[in-house]
Image (cartoon, coloured by chain):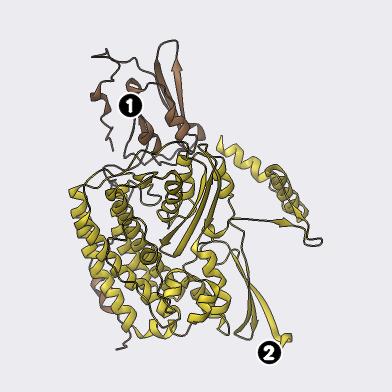
Chain colours: A yellow, B brown
Amino acid sequence: MDLNNVVKIPIGPQHPCLKEPACFTVSLNGERLAGLDLRLGYNHRGIEKAAESRTYIQNIYLIERVCGICSHSHPSCYIQCVEQIAGLEVPARGRYLRSLIGELERVHSHLLWLGVAAYEIGFETLLMYSWRDREVVMDILAMLTGNRVNYAANVIGGANRDITEDHKKDILKAVDVLEERTKYYIEVATEEATLIARLSNVGYISLDDVKLMGTAGPTARASGLDYDVRRDDPYAAYKDIPFKVITDTHCDVYGRALVRVGELMESYKMIRHIIQNIPDGPIAVKAPRKIPAGEAISRYEAPRGEDVHYVRSNGTDKPERVRVRAPTMVNLLSVPKMLEGDNLADVPITIAAIDPCFSCTDRAIRVSDLDGGNAKVMTWNETRRFGIDWYRKNGIDFTDLNKRLAGRMR
Amino acid sequence: MKKPGKMLSEMFKNVAKAPATTSYPFTKAEMPKDFRGQIVFTSENCIGCNICVRDCPAAAICITKQGEEKIFGAYFDLDVCIYCAQCVLSCPKKALSVSPNFELAQLTRSGFRVVFPAKPKPPKVDGDKPAEGQVAPTTSA
């Protein structure tokens, strides 16, 4: 590699191929990638710290907003921790309801991914149709939980809302429609020549590398790793629900697409099984407001991969520490490996193929002096002041704009 | 078997179909029955326990006491409300309920404060139990 010819191009923090801010600095040798440097932290919202000053009940809604797409996975995972510490046994119907919403969420997330991936490769017809079909499952989620996103379907000790016979009929009807559509998408994915040509051998990562980097979810399963938390460490009602773990040996973006559409078909089967076999009884047990001292870790198979939460309690009604590890964190690490030797044009689809969510991922931040390497802690007001001064120093002053905006708001 | 143009037939099928989108402001959007829209407060049922205020993740509720008697009003700041309906779940006397009203945009910030004035309680039937008939959620679209 001739180092004199290496050109560095920043992709992000604001870039058309990214839906959320993250910075990928790409080193290019001609059209080929010579290296990739990843920088996160543009979406840090201080959720873990905020969780320490809220009660366990309030935290359900805060943790739910870690991610808009996995808005059932994160609170479920957090609540599993709290229930484990408090020693609560969720009734069978509550566990089934959790699995039901979890699978509906997976359906909507994978259909969304299919659209995003199609968009990244310029196949906008597929984007439009898959997002139109996604509305079917969004309507079902709105009907069951009262919200299209951020369902708040959980309470500590069980589920929030019960389903009725009418709901069951509507869900089965919607699943029939979606299954037929997904069969068509599988046909498209396996027969459409342009799609196969564009996705094959892009973003290749071998099984050994997947194991080395700890890659999770459909990204890992597309490289042949036969691992799924729902089967290997069952939570909610997954112990009673038969399903197949979809794996693929393509190891590239095409394999990841096949795994996701395959998982859609499994999800429909699971939803039907849940509807037919959901036991009667209470949906939740009463939970205490104060959780006894203790700590717990729990895992959850989110649509994007394995989600891990840790909660430490100290006997009050507020947790002492909440830690969220989203699947994107581990999957991002494998992106530089996937892109080794690929073209610049493959960067957007390879990043999109891990189904990244940077808001999920941005958890901790450490401000350090680049010269001395000394860590520095800033209060909120200091950080604000620092930002204003930094922009002023660079010739940007928001004072007038702020005044104008404030005048308009009144 | 690889062949290009797999989606062409689908496209042609959709040429003759009506659009999947709706022309929203002109055709009314219908929300499901239990949609988590604006919260409605029934003053007659409120006992002023303030559990909703304590549980609200967004600090959007304030329960106000009127005079010396146990009559309570409430106001909601809809600009900070996250429509999670935890208050409805927490309320022990069903003084709060969800309504499917989702068209809540305002031109001024002050318009987001929704005030429910305190109303005197209906005559008691037996003991401290509030009348169950007051509970019905408002279903005005």
The residue singled out by tag 2 in the image is: A1
**Between marks 1 and 2, how big is the CA–CA gap?**
73 Å
Task: Locate residue B134, reporting x and y percent.
Answer: 26, 24
Task: Locate residue A17, reporting x and y percent.
Answer: 52, 69
Q: Amino acid at mark 1?
A: Lys
The residue singled out by tag 1 in the image is: B93
Mark 1 or mark 2: which is in front?
Answer: 1
Q: Quadrant of residue B6?
A: bottom left
Q: Quadrant of residue B123?
A: top left
Q: Residue at x 51, y 35 (%)?
A: B109
Subunit of label 2: A
Q: Quadrant of the C terminus of chain A?
A: top right
Checking the image for residue A378, the label placed there is none
Subunit of label 1: B
Task: Locate residue B7, reporting x and y percent.
Answer: 30, 78
Q: Residue at x 54, y 60 (%)?
A: A361
Q: Report the front residue among A322 and B57.
A: A322
Q: Quadrant of residue A231?
A: bottom left
Task: Locate residue B126, reporting x and y percent.
Answer: 24, 14
What element does badge 1 sit on? loop
A133 vs A279: above or below: below
Q: Residue at x 27, y 14 (%)?
A: B127
Q: Residue furthest right?
A: A372
Question: Is A7 situated left or right of A306 in this image?
Answer: right
Q: Amino acid at mark 2?
A: Met
Q: Label 2 neighbourhood size at 10 Å, few (<14), some (14-19), many (20+)?
A: few
The reply to whether residue B26 is visible in this rendering is no
